[in-house]
Amino acid sequence: MVKRTRFQAIIAMMCALALVPSNAFGWSVEAHQAIALIATNRLQPATAKRIASLLGQLSLVDIAVCPDQVRELEANEIKTLSPACATIFPDPPKGTEQWHFVNTPVKDAKFTPAASDVTTACKNVCAVIQIPRFLAVLAASKTTDTGAAKIADQQALSFVVHFIGDIHQPLHSADRNGDAGGNAEHVTFFGSDDSNELVLHHIWDDQIVAKVQKTYTALAGSLTAQIAAAAAEPKSQPMDWALQAYLPARDVAYQGIPAANGKTDVANLGQAYQDAAAPIVKLQVARAGVRLADALNTAFAAPVNSRAK
């Protein structure tokens, strides 16, 4: 997730371009790192050992936001990658922006999409496609991989960590009237609108999370009940996650929010909105962490990983 110091300039640029149909941002750094920490604590010993071998001195927390930095670098929003991200993305790929979300349309207040609606919105490039794609890379990886092969494995791991987080952010799984998941609706939150640059999507990325807990360790540590609930849910797949995340976007994130009106604030959001949104954010972060661990445990349990070739 981009830092707040860059957020205003990016939103201004998006407005000037009349908003392309994409969800430009993801969970905050803290939320992505909390998801990675929750997953780390649920890894099978063999999986944890395999990841440690693959990443060396780095951790899942360290690589959780690298895909955002890769996208930001291509868009000239940052000058360079962080040292951790530069290690595993020495030659960052291009054209990854649409991998972070799926713009399933909120056609009306009661519309519930089917998998076919998600597939249509995905256009064969979205997070629903990318997650299994990169999990397959991990499943085929070998402990003997070196050089370019090992870098590809590291990048696949970073993309999986990040995209499983992204798809659980409700406004990464929904779009209303081409608003790029709430990036068009200017709002105030607890009386502030960041000099008229605050949009609904940013609130769900960052500000709701920040009011729940300030650090990723505190956030992960506060979700014991939500993690237990997520772990008790039936096993599911990325398509299920996208469909599930769509519902709170429709029923809570967009609830009471008028259509975008240029840069005019269309809603004044405060404690009531926070109270409705916070339980969803906490459960979705917990779900993402639990499901990330399950996905990695499954991928690295593939027999090919124990064979030197």
Image: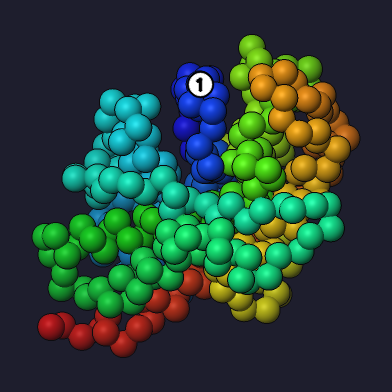
Three-letter code, disc 1: Ala
**Which of the 4 image quarters holds residue 181?**
top right
In the rendered image, the vertical position of residue 147 relative to residue 22, given as above or below:
below
Viewer-nearest residue: 225 or 82: 82
In the rendered image, the vertical position of residue 212 relative to residue 268, given as above or below:
below
Q: Percent from the top left, x then y, of residue 97?
A: 41, 45
Is residue 142 visible in the rendered image? The answer is yes
Please give the count of numbered marks on the rendered protein: 1
Residue at x-position 77% and y-position 42%: 254
Residue at x-position 35% and y-position 83%: 302
Q: Is residue 277 left or right of residue 4?
A: right
Q: Percent from the top left, x then y, of residue 180?
A: 59, 41
Q: Secondary structure at mark 1?
A: helix
- Residue located farthest toward the top when viewing the structure as drawn: 195
Q: Residues within 10 Å of mark 1 (few under 14, many from 20)?
A: few
Residue at x-position 72% and y-position 18%: 264
Q: Is residue 145 left or right of residue 275?
A: left
Residue at x-position 19% and y-position 45%: 91
Q: How is the image coloured?
A: rainbow
Q: Is residue 35 left or right of residue 175?
A: left
Q: Percent from the top left, x then y, of residue 225?
A: 74, 60
Q: Percent from the top left, x then y, of residue 1?
A: 49, 38
**Which of the 4 image quarters holds residue 245?**
bottom right
Q: Which residue is mark 1?
A: 16
Is residue 38 visible in the rendered image? The answer is no
Viewer-nearest residue: 41 or 4: 4
The C terminus sits in image quarter: bottom left
